[in-house]
Image: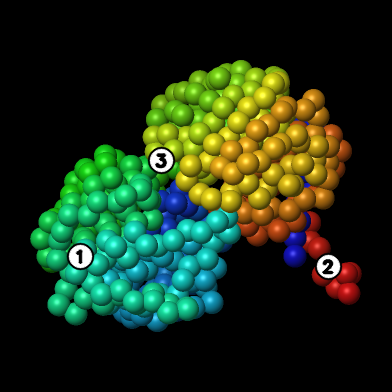
Amino acid sequence: MEKIVIRGGNELYGDVYINGMKNAALPIIFATILTADKCIIENVPRVSDITMSFEILREMGASVNYLDETTVEIDTYALVGGNSPYNIVQRMRGSTYLLGAELGRFKKSKVAYPGGCNFGTRPIDMHIKGFQTLGATVTEDDEYVYADAPNGLVGNSIYFDKVSVGATVNIMLAATLADGLTVIENAAREPHIVDLANFLNTCGADIRGAGTGIIKITGVEKLHGCTYDIIPDMIEAGTYMTAVAATGGEVNIRNVIPKHLEIISTKLSEMGVEVRAFDDYITVKSNGKLRSTNIQTLPYPGFPTDMHPQFSTLLAIADGSGTVYETIWQNRFKYVAELEKMGASVMVNEPFAAFRGVEKLHGASVAAVDLRAGAAIVIAGLVAEGTTEVTNIYTIERGYLDIVGKLKSLGADITKIYIDENAFI
């Protein structure tokens, strides 16, 4: 076991470089299954969700090799469908994409129910509805989801009642090799949807409209391998932007696409933070004195749900009262109890939370209850008086590469230490 120890009060200065986007890399990694060929993927973040996805592919018969620290060669020619490792699939939400990839290539799929962050129900009913509309028969038991299309998938029109990134990804994967035209209406528009479409098109797919509410996929007979570069991680970038806003200081956030960060930059500006955008980096300057604001999470290009916890930390120390209205996921406010241990004043009435800013947070022993909540707690520790100890940090490392080292390079007093479990026996 490991924990993060933070002594708060230091401003942040310098440059931080953003890695490739985990939420873009995962669907692309599973999309390589469709190629039955060799792909070279660049700018891959070496976080635990990614390494688990590689373990899954290897156990299914694929060859996965790092060419350098961020470049991976994946050959799925010998991969066998329907035999993904149950114990790993259960630990990560992104393994859902195996369903669409296996169904697209093998015309059948068997995948365990996926895991990941535990904040409310995250059903796959829209994924299943989409597969059925393409002609698959889908059944479930207590452990697995099965999909079968022995005569192949046939393009169709699919309308999602609610915008869903996961369902949009899965139908794109399944429809790429289907017979005819598939039209997804009310599709997710996130940058990682566009990145997946660009990857698949580079491999020979015919996908148009990604980044809009209507995506059209004309099925092709086969795909081929390619070399592809993953986009920068807008959520990692946004997390460091909020860290600077909280502590004060001035940091250049390097290797980003500023357009992807517009809503985050706008909200920080509302709170009194100076944000300047350049070609491939953003400069954030803050004196640590924040004005409160109101946040409502929405599908892209609205405010991202994955930035809600980090902004909650800002609201906890901002001047005045602010609210968060979470419209994407249920029960995402579990982390509030950890902020309250540090002195935050919060009233939760799902799906709302009301924050009354306090003058100071204080250090405490707290836990990272999920990936983004863990990042929020780390930011709270950076600005708190005294020492904060964060446990359950494996949840943070699912999506942030070397967060401790990056923050330390900016001047934070932060360390990751090993906990001897035997000391508690």
Residue 247 is at least partly visible in this image: no
**Quarter in which the N terminus is drawn:** bottom right
| Image quarter of residue 362 | top right
**Residue 355 occupies which quadrant of the picture?**
top right
Q: At 65% from the left edge and 59% from the top edge, which residue is drawn?
A: 394
Q: Amino acid at mark 1?
A: Leu
Vertical side of 190 occupied by 322: above or below: above
Q: Please state the horizontal and vertical placement of residue 208, each as a whole percent of the image.
A: 19, 46
Give how far apart the Cα atoms at labels 3 and 2 are: 42 Å
Query: Is residue 189 toward the left or the right of residue 49 in the image?
Result: left
The kind of residue tagged 3 is Pro
In the rendering, at what x and y percent does residue 390 appear?
76, 51
**Residue named by callout 1:** 134
Whether tag 3 and tag 2 are in contact, CB under 8 A, the answer is: no
Q: Earlier in the sequence, mark 3 or mark 1?
A: 1
How far across and how far down the image is residue 273, in percent? 60, 20
Front residue of this view, candidates 389 and 370: 370
* In this rendering, position of residue 406 left or right of residue 120: right
Between the C-alphas of marks 2 and 1, the distance is 52 Å
Q: Residue at x 45, y 24 (%)?
A: 278
Measured in 3D between alpha carbons, the distance from the residue under mark 3 to the one under mark 1, in whole angstroms, is: 25 Å
Residue found at x 62% / y 54%: 370
Question: Going from the N terminus, do you reach mark 3 or mark 2 first?
Answer: 3
Residue nearest the observer in this picture, 3 or 271? 271
Q: Which residue is mark 3?
A: 299
Comparing labels 2 and 1, the label whose residue is closer to the camera: 1
As displayed, is residue 287 above or below residue 260?
above
Q: Is residue 413 left or right of residue 41?
A: right
Disc 1 secondary structure class: loop
Can see residue 108? yes
